[in-house]
Amino acid sequence: MPREPVKMGPALSGEHAEANSIAALRKQAEGCERCDLYKHATQLVFGEGPGEARVVLVGEQPGDREDLAGRPFVGPAGRILDECLHEAGIDRSSCYLTNAVKHFKFEERGKRRLHSRPNAGEIERCSWWLGAELEELHPKVVVALGATALASLLGRRAGVLKNRGDLITTPAGYPVLVTIHPSYLLRIRNRVDAAAERGRFVKDLAKIAAQVE
Ligand code: SF4
C-alpha cells in the first residue's frame, strides 16, 4: 500500500528562532518563556555537539540528571545511547545531541521528581528552538528518538511503531531516521526482551553510517 505523504511537524515548518550560531541560539533560549516549563526546571538544557555535526539526535526532554547538570543525555538513558551508538559504529562526540523540549517537565512525589511527558502545546512551542538548531547545522541525517521527537519533526500523526527503522525523506533536505528513545530499554524488565530490543536499537542506529559516508 502506498505511504501517505509525509507531513512536517512544527520543527520543520520553517518557523524558528534566528541566530548565526548555536551559541547565540542557546543564549536566546536561556530567556525563553514560550511555555510554562521554565518556571519549575533548574535550567535550560540546550543541544550540544560540534558545529559541523552531520548527525543530529533528538530526544524527548531533559531528565532529572540533565536538568541538574544543564547538559543533554548525561543520565542513564544517555549511557545506553552512548553504548549503542558505539556498537553501531557511530562516534557520539561527532554527533549533536538535543531534545524536542528544552526544560525538564516533572511531577513532585515527596522528594522525587518524576518525569512527565510534554504535551502537544509544549512540543510545538519548543520546536522554535529545535527548528533553529536544525537550520543552523543542516545535518545529513536527523534521528528521532521516540514519540515526542517524532511529533516535533514529522507531526503528531507519525507513529514510532509504524515508522520504526525507516529513513523518511523530508523537504528540509535531510532524512529523519525513526527509532525508540533509549529510556524505553531501561523500562523492559525481561532480560531476553531487553537484549532483543537493544539489538534492534543498535540496528536502527547503524543506518546512520550510510547517510554520512
Ligand atoms: S520548554 Fe522550550 S518553549 Fe518551554 S520555556 Fe523551555 S525552552 Fe521555552
Image: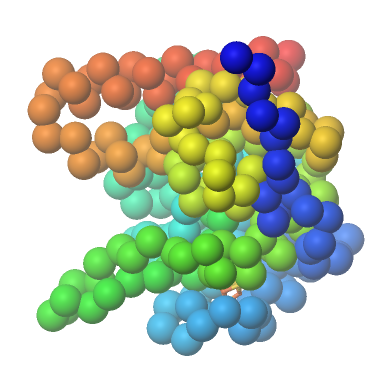
Q: Quadrant of the N terminus?
A: top right
| In the depicted structure, whether residue 105 falls above or below residue 199 | below
Q: What residue lies at 38% left-to-right and 28% top-to-bottom?
A: 83
* Residue placed furthest toward the right: 20
| In the depicted structure, whether residue 18 falls above or below residue 150 | below
| In the depicted structure, whether residue 6 falls above or below residue 207 | below
Q: What residue lies at 72% left-to-right and 20% top-to-bottom?
A: 212
Q: 106 left or right of 151?
A: left
Does residue 55 appear in this view?
A: no
| In the depicted structure, whether residue 90 falls above or below residue 37 | above
Q: Give the x, y percent position of residue 113.
A: 25, 72
Does residue 145 appear in this view?
A: yes
Q: What residue lies at 54% left-to-right and 54% top-to-bottom?
A: 99
Tell me the quarter of the picture where residue 78 sits. top left
Q: Give the x, y percent position of residue 65.
A: 34, 61
Q: In the depicted view, which residue is nearer to us: 93 or 63?
A: 63
Q: 184 left or right of 122?
A: left
**Rendered image coloring scheme:** rainbow
Q: 81 left or right of 122?
A: left
